[in-house]
Image (cartoon, helix red, strand yellow):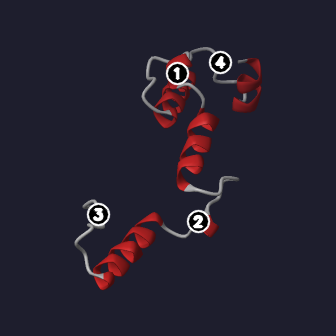
């Protein structure tokens, strides 16, 4: 997506059209599913909620899904624990 810039030489109609493009690209703030009231706050809220990825105790620290998948694989590869139901195994962790 190209950056939309309103230039000082734009006509009023060009300014209007570009402003609408910017608004459309941002989306409807009323549909945010966070408690934030603007896009920057919403992104920051989501970033803060996921925590510090570098603090993960997994090898993969790139994203939460990869870290969870790593743990899932590790649990599935455990030997001698196959008789323990997964909820009990998770409670032990």
Badges 1 and 3: C-beta atoms under 8 Å apart?
no
Mark 4: few/some/many CA within 10 Å (<14, 14-19, 20+): few
Image x and y of residue 21, in percent = 36, 73
Q: Which residue is at a point 25% across and 75% down the rendered structure image?
A: 10
Badges 1 and 2: C-beta atoms under 8 Å apart?
no
Q: Earlier in the sequence, mark 2 or mark 3?
A: 3
Q: Which residue is at a point 57% across and 41% down the rendered structure image?
A: 44
Label 1, secondary structure: give it.
helix
Q: Which mark is residue 81?
A: 4
The answer to which quarter of the image holds residue 46 is top right
Q: Earlier in the sequence, mark 1 or mark 3?
A: 3
The residue nearer to you, when weighing 57 against 17, is 17
Q: Which residue is mark 1?
A: 74
Q: Which residue is at a point 56% across and 38% down the rendered structure image?
A: 47
Q: Which residue is mark 3?
A: 5
Badges 4 and 2: C-beta atoms under 8 Å apart?
no
Is 68 situated above or below 13?
A: above
Label 3, secondary structure: give it.
loop
Distance between the alpha carbons at the discs numbered 4 and 1: 12 Å
Image x and y of residue 25, in percent = 40, 67
């Amino acid at each position: 997506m190209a950056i939309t810039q309103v230039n000082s030489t734009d006509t009023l109609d060009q300014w209007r059209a570009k402003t609408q493009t910017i608004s459309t690209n941002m989306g409807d703030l009323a549909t945010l599913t966070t408690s934030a009231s603007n896009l920057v706050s919403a992104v920051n809220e989501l970033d803060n909620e996921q925590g510090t990825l570098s603090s993960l105790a997994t090898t993969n620290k790139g994203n939460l899904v990869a870290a969870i998948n790593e743990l899932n694989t590790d649990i599935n590869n455990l030997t001698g624990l196959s008789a323990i139901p997964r909820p009990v195994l998770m409670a032990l962790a």
